[in-house]
Image (cartoon, rainbow, N blue to C red):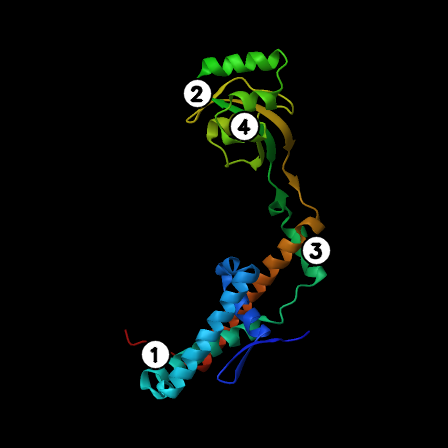
Amino acid sequence: MENKVLAKVNDREIKQSDVEFLYSNLGPNAAQYKGEEGYKQLVEQLILEEMLYSDAKENKLDEDKEYLAGLEQLKKSLLAQYSVSKLMSNIDVSENEIEEYYSSNKNIFKSAENVTASHILVETSEKAEEVLKEINEGLDFAEAAQKYSSCPSKNSGGNLGQFGRGQMVVEFEDAVFSMKIGEISSPVKTQFGYHLIQLNAKNESKELSLEEAKEDIINRVRYEKQNKIYSEKQNQLREKYPVEYKY
């Protein structure tokens, strides 16, 4: 793949790979640099960095004691981090380990109970009863939500999507998780007002298959191995390099 030269500063080339490296190290801030304009901003950042570097070299700032001390500290920190990454780089998780972990920990590999529901939110119990009466007389629940609900979900017929326990206020949760699919509740009072709830679907808690849990197991086993290796390395280093505390 071509590593295109995007600019030159003082005969030093800024390449496509330099921009990609900068982008990969932006972390959560990377999103704001997506697209053509964001790409151009990153190129400009690298150009400015090269100009600042040239200016600093010209003024012999790389010979300052403060710079050299900071550089040594940075090199020490970077080398220590690199040492840890090398230590962790060859950790594998075998199929046998995955199966063994799954068999020993089946109780933690369960999908949580969840429901899909719609609701209509109004201010008073009287209004809720009126709307419920219209629904019982044939008005479609989604149409009633669009017509009467004060919740933004009215625009999608009152649909709240899928959610589990702990995501709604207690009164709403107690009602919806005790309902049958297709059932419409009587008015439910919460801090927001009065709700009419329609239960659209319910998924009971179930044990995940090995295949469904596999990725999670790999991460868990790898994490356990990393902790063990890191702990063993610490103990080895403490034996090799005695520590004398001065505080």
- Label 4 environment density (alpha carbons within 10 Å; few <14, some 14–19, many ≥20): many
Marks 4 and 2, how far apart at CA: 15 Å
Residue to which mark 1 is pinned: 244
User: Decide: marks 4, 2 in contact (CB < 8 A)?
Assistant: no
| Residue 93 percent location from the top left of the image | 66, 63
| Residue 68 percent location from the top left of the image | 37, 85
Of badges 4 and 2, the one in the foreground is 4
Of badges 4 and 1, the one in the foreground is 4
Residue to which mark 2 is pinned: 123
Place residue 134 in its image quadrant.
Answer: top right
Q: Amino acid at mark 4?
A: Lys
Marks 2 and 1, how far apart at CA: 69 Å
Q: Nearer the viewer, residue 35 or 232?
A: 35
Q: Quadrant of the N terminus?
A: bottom right
**Numbered circle sitting on residue 99:** 3
Marks 4 and 1, how far apart at CA: 67 Å
Q: Nearer the viewer, residue 81 or 38?
A: 38
Residue to which mark 4 is pinned: 154
